[in-house]
Amino acid sequence: DQKSFLQDSAAVQPLNKELRRAFIVAQELVTFIKQSPTAFHAVANMQNILIEHGYEELLEGQTWQIKKGGHYFVTRNNSSIIAFNLGENLDNYSFNVAASHSDSPTFKVKENAEIEIKGKYTQLNTEGYGGMLCATWFDRPLSIAGRVLVQEGDNYVTKLVNIDRDLVMIPNVAIHMNRTVNDGYAYNKQVDMLPLFGGSETKPGDLKKLIADELGVDVETIYGTDLYLYNRMEPSIWGANEEFISCPQLDDLQCAYTSLQGFLKGANKQSINVFACFDNEEVGSGTKQGAGSTFLYDAMRRINNALGKGEEEYYRALASSFMLSADNAHAVHPNHPAKTDVNNCVYMNEGIVVKSHAGQKYTSDAVSIAVFKGLCKKAGVPVQFFSNRSDTAGGSTLGNIAMAQVSMNSVDIGLPQLAMHSSYETAGVKDTAYMIKVMEEFFNSHIEEMSGHILKVTK
């Protein structure tokens, strides 16, 4: 009964094998995103995918029993996840790490959420999470999802919730009441961005009752919530040749999903392959589950120790280890091409983006770029290069933050997109498949530091 939004596509039938695969992968991506309205849901879906592929869950609070050739994963805060598979010949091992993030800019529902307006409306009190494009959140169906802590006896149990219907909306002010809005407007998140939840029949406590009913629990048993707004607009494949894909949360679930798929396809007997997806990148990564935490460090040290290897072996492994820090990149905007560098600029459907910055906002350098270009060549995947305009401050990502905890060679990569941090972003149909191919190539490879001047990459 769930008809694919691609089934009616006139462009799909005559496509060659590569393009047809790109359309299928794009469909799989948006299905994953639709099922992942929050970081908690994204990680839960990643867990399910890993379990389906034979991965065993480890808990940080218990002893790790692992063995060569094994497949494992561990989560932190239900919003970050690290999975790893072990080669069978680990005498001279190293780590292959692909890192992405699970969160996206949105609005968090405050604890005391309901605001009554003259007995006629009920708004929800929210605050911004990350640097969103506020204008994209108006006049479209939204809903609420997140996690809820429910008391069950002496236990506080985490339950995921998603009100899977059009529930709230943030209405714009009519132009008749704001004549200069098209000349530029500074949105006030406490005034302009509060969603409308109900009319005169709505009563205080209705939101929590709605959440309790959805979970099948009593309101009195709810002891904590992390609830967020999400955009319910359906994904779209569009363009003259149906070459573009639009949906929420492409930054960074597109990289998270493709990294995971490449990870599941790849294997190398001499390496420990690691898939890492961190929460809270959009607010600086400085949490217990962010890239700036000890999560990756803890996991890598515990893997080394559980395998019976010593301190010296761990440091030798780090010297040959390599990270792909995967977070989406800004494509050239058709209306504003001057916003990007004159020739270090990227386009959708033209391949993987390598990001570099003289001020070290990105981890890429000549060594890591060379290795990654070689991987792309072997995978038959096109590669592009991105740098910010020299007179413009750009963003940063999780690579350098993670490197403060666990240092290794690293390259910052991503997929080109438009409208980053919009509630509805746009990317290229082909690029999702490109990323899976190069990730598979990476996880099939063993990287070894032969000397201070030579890195050897083999399968």
Image (spheres, rainbow, N blue to C red):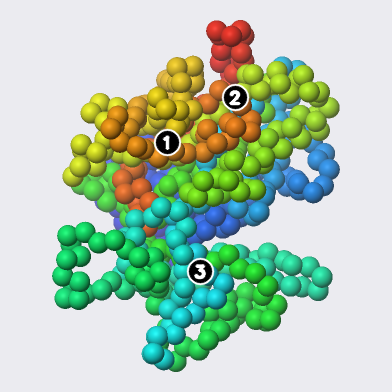
- Residue 322: name its quadrant: top right
**Dot 2 surroundings within 10 Å: few (below 14), some, or many (20 or more)?**
many
Amino acid at circle 3: Val
State how far apart marks 1 and 3 are (Cα): 30 Å
Residue 46 visible in image: no
Label number found at residue 109: 3
Is the N terminus in the top left, top right, bottom left or bottom right quadrant? bottom left
Reading the chain from its start, which is encountered first: label 1 or label 2? 2
* Of callouts 1 and 3, the N-terminal one: 3
Pointers 3 and 2 in contact (CB under 8 A)? no
Disc 2 residue type (three-letter): Met
Q: CA distance from mark 1 to mark 2?
A: 19 Å
Q: Position of residue 149 (x, y in %)?
A: 67, 68
Work out whether mark 3 precedes mark 2 in sequence or the reverse, and give the earlier one: 3
Residue type of the residue flagged with mark 1: Gly
| Label 3 Cα neighbours within 10 Å, binned few <14 / some 14-19 / many ≥20 | many
Q: Are marks 1 and 3 in contact (CB under 8 Å)?
A: no
Which residue is labeled 2 in the image? 408
Count up the numbered dots. Answer: 3
The x and y percentages for residue 95 are 64, 27
- Residue 348 lies left or right of residue 359; in this view the side is left
Q: Nearer the viewer, mark 1 or mark 3?
A: 3
Describe the element under mark 1 as helix, strand or loop: strand
Disc sitting over residue 414 in the figure:
1
**Residue in the foreground of this view, choosing between 239 and 418:** 418
- The residue that appears at 72% across and 38% down in the rendered structure is 298
Screen quadrant of the C terminus = top right
* Mark 1 or 2: the one toward you: 2
The residue nearer to you, when weighing 125 against 301, is 125
Label placed on residue 279 = none
Q: Residue at x 42, y 27 (%)?
A: 359
Q: Secondary structure at mark 2?
A: loop
